[in-house]
Image (cartoon, rainbow, N blue to C red):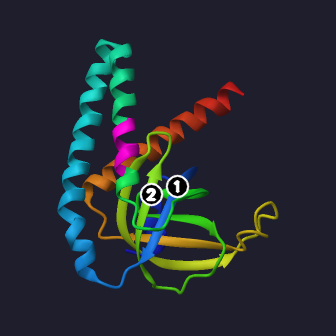
Amino acid sequence: MTEEEERRRYFRIDDEVAISFALLEDESEADQESLNQEFHMSLEVQIRHAMVDIRSQNAKVAQVLDLMNQKINLLRSVDNQDGSQPVMKGANLSACGIAFPWHEALPINQQLMVNLYLQPHHELIRTEAHVAAVTANKDPSDATDDPYIVRLDFDNIQKNYEEVLIQHVVQRQGYQLRKKLDD
């Protein structure tokens, strides 16, 4: 599949995410957390599906349950930090990759373990990625601090993570369109 075809498979949005990453040097490191992450994401997907039914029956209960899930996700994200603190960044996000401003150029094809914390629910998405491209940041408002735009392609993303990312992108896109219409 060409890069152009892959870009068309998923919606892309401009969003704000908290991101941290580490160089991936040991494959077993990624495998160790794989089962735990897969189980967590399976639960997260099940919660999302159940919340649709609950929301239609009782909006207040759904709001409380959603807040509790956000709190649990926030606590979990703090526990899963791998030493590098997440940084809030404006990003262009899809289910297959992310582009964001960064303070240094990363080597092309560098393998990374990426932690994304989707806002506003603090949902942790953890996946392998590689640096697909690094370009100059042409946005004068943040090019001084972050002179590069780093583009990562997600590799071996678990289906549950992919589903959560797709749902997040669609929900955020809907929110952004509604906000634009209201303005």
Name the secondary structure under disc 1: strand
- The residue tagged 2 is 116
Image: magenta residue range: 70-76
In this view, the residue in front, 76 or 28, is 76
Amino acid carrying label 2: it is Leu
Q: Please give the name of the residue rendered at 26% of the width and 61% of the height, measured from the top-left corner.
A: 158
Q: Residue 36: x, y in percent?
A: 20, 58
Asked if 105 appears above or below 35 in the picture, the reply is below
Location of residue 104 (image quadrant): bottom right
Mark nearer the N terminus (2 vs 1): 1
Q: Is residue 146 left or right of residue 24?
A: right
- The residue tagged 1 is 18
Are dots 2 and 1 in contact, CB under 8 Å?
Answer: yes
Amino acid carrying label 1: it is Ala
The label on residue 93 is none
Q: Residue 63: x, y in percent?
A: 39, 22
